[in-house]
Amino acid sequence: MRAPVYLVRHGQSEWNVLRLTQGQTDHPRLTDLGRAQAEAAASVLAADLADGEARLVTSDLLRALETARTIGDRLGVEPVLDFRLREQHLGSLEGLRYEESWAHAELHDWTDPELPMAGGESVAAVRRRLAEVLDAVDPAVPTVLVSHGDAIRAAIALLLDQPVTDVPWVEVANGSVARWDGELAWLDPVGDDGPDFAVDEHGTLPGTRPTPR
């Protein structure tokens, strides 16, 4: 039986509150709520790991790194930085209000996974780097990966062997924890700053895929 892999989204950031598209923008820090969400995620992980050994790997973007440091303090392990766990690079959308990003997303050709988003990074490129991270995980050691909404969605799609052109929307709340041990389970997702996007009944913007924060 393989050791579990945990996927943790960073806590709420300053730009989440301001409703600004982040992508790979590095400077937004966690809010007070975001720090509380990181603490709650750390508690969920500690309980599930039952004080066992774990490896902690994190995106190097500040909001993820702050989350990982909180988790590392609780688990007694130093986080290892891996740029491949960053959020999708969103090019000219970064810094725009959500509504502006959504308007651009409606014009994006989601049938072409190699098409970069607004001059940034394509969905397929995100998936490739997440595949590299998952392939490098030691199956004998529980591993915690701290990342971002769309990066985690890409990882989940890979773990579930879903095709890149037909991936169901998965809500990934700030501070949420998913565990993969051959099956996917969400571990008591904690407080969140609201839905990631204004979505329709199918969980997506009409005619589009949601744009990450």
Image (cartoon, rainbow, N blue to C red):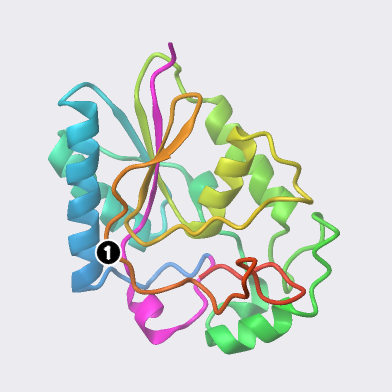
- Which residue is rendered at x = 51% and y = 54% of the image? 86
Q: Which residue is mark 1?
A: 191
Residue 46 sits in quarter: top left
- Which residue is rendered at x = 43% and y = 67% of the image? 26
Look at the picture and state if 6 lies above or below 68. above
Extreme top residue here? Answer: 1
Residue 53 sits in quarter: top left
Look at the picture and state if 25 lies above or below 93. above
Closest to the observer, 93 or 169? 169
Is residue 12 in the magenta section?
yes
The three-letter amino acid code for the residue at tag 1 is Gly
- Which residue is rendered at x = 56% and y = 67% of the image? 212
Left or right of residue 16, residue 46 in this image: left
Image position, residue 152 (x, y; %)? 51, 49
Closest to the observer, 55 or 191? 191
Is residue 37 in the magenta section?
no
Q: Residues within 10 Å of mark 1 (few under 14, many from 20)?
A: some
Left or right of residue 71, residue 98 in this image: right
Image position, residue 40 (x, y; %)? 19, 53
- In the rendered image, the quadrant that contains the N terminus is top left
Which residues, given as a range, are shown in magenta? Answer: 1-23
Q: Is residue 21 visible?
A: yes
Image position, residue 179 (x, y; %)? 40, 36
Closest to the observer, 168 or 7? 168
Q: Secondary structure at mark 1?
A: loop
